[in-house]
Amino acid sequence: MSPTMAADENEFVIDAEGLTKSFGNRTVVRDLTIRVRRGRIFGFLGANGSGKTTTIRMLAGLLRPDAGRGTCLGYDITTQTEMLKRHVGYMTQHFSLYTDLSIRQNLEFVARVHELPHPRRQARAAIERLGLAGREDQLAGALSGGWKQRLALSACILPGPELLLLDEPTAGVDPKARRDFWNNIHDLAAEGMTVLVSTHYMDEAERCHELAYLSAGQILTRGTAQEVIENSHLTTWTVSGPDLSELAKRIKTLPGIESVTPFGTTLHVSGTDAARIEKSISGLLDGPQKWERAEVTLEDVFIHMMGVAGDGEA
């Protein structure tokens, strides 16, 4: 049993400080500190190569950090990896179960690997829990992306972990399947499970209790979605009307304008100095386009950060 079983919801299930990891002359994670409380869903965001997967693999005990220290569920991530793996569920972005076995066979196999009592009964319970009933005899390889992810999550929680580490679990999955997947995650968190999840999707980021944005292996900002938006100090205008492509080219270099991004039939124009933006666009407000001050969104913030920090690759 994990040392944290009797801990209250204010206790840190993940507590890591100064994590650093290099591959050759590339530092992929640099002096990273993260703490996540019990029952929380913590979202990792960042461009490809920003260090999300490496961080998750260190927390799972699969990679040894070059520097720093950390615990998950009270277990040291460098010296107690075997105990850690027994209590942590780790789900990669690539489907890793047996494609030539059925849903039921895969889950029974997982139950036996973990030496769970009554593996058939455990598999049936997992099938019912995540809505796989009626499909249990389908081959895993014949499932759609959404059903594969549901099966992978079933296998991940079958041994009864207290912490889930999910690395872009819904990549390539359709919107309905993503929504169903996240409903399952929230149900698990409500039961006391702690979740660390990396994602590229802003609608998923908004469903996390807390967020952190990584770039070049460092956390640039963290907090709730609202705190991240407020701490960005961004001002955003939306522009609609004709010739938006030409307008975007003209205004990108104006003082105070730090990002110009197409959103459907509009442009989002953002920057951290509201007065400079207003001065720069003052001569355009009577033009053919319609300018409106807009509420800053999480997507505005992360697009802005990607522009400031570059592509995020370490």
Image: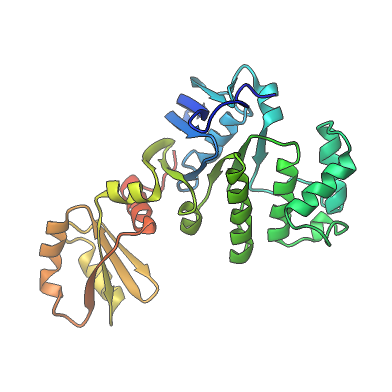
Instruction: Tell me, yes or no, if residue 216 can be seen here.
Output: yes
Quadrant (top left/top right/bottom left/bottom right) for the N terminus:
top right
Q: Nearer the viewer, residue 230 or 6?
A: 6
- Left-right relation of 304 to 15: left
Identify the residue shown where x is 86% and y is 33%: 117
Horizontally, residue 232 falls left or right of residue 161, namely left
Please name the colour scheme applied to the rendered image. Answer: rainbow
Q: Position of residue 158 (x, y in %)?
A: 75, 41
Q: Quadrant of residue 295?
A: bottom left
Across and down, in percent, residue 311 comes to 41, 48
Looking at the image, residue 312 lies above or below residue 259: above
Residue 131 at x, y = what percent?
A: 74, 58
Query: How many numbered marks are there?
Result: 0
Q: Position of residue 284 (x, y in %)?
A: 15, 74
> Which residue does the image show at 17% across and 53% down from the upper left?
273
One can see residue 255 in this view: no
187 versus 299 height, above or below: above
Q: Which residue is rendered at x = 71% and y = 54% of the image?
A: 150
Work out which quarter of the rendered image holds the C terminus and state it: top left
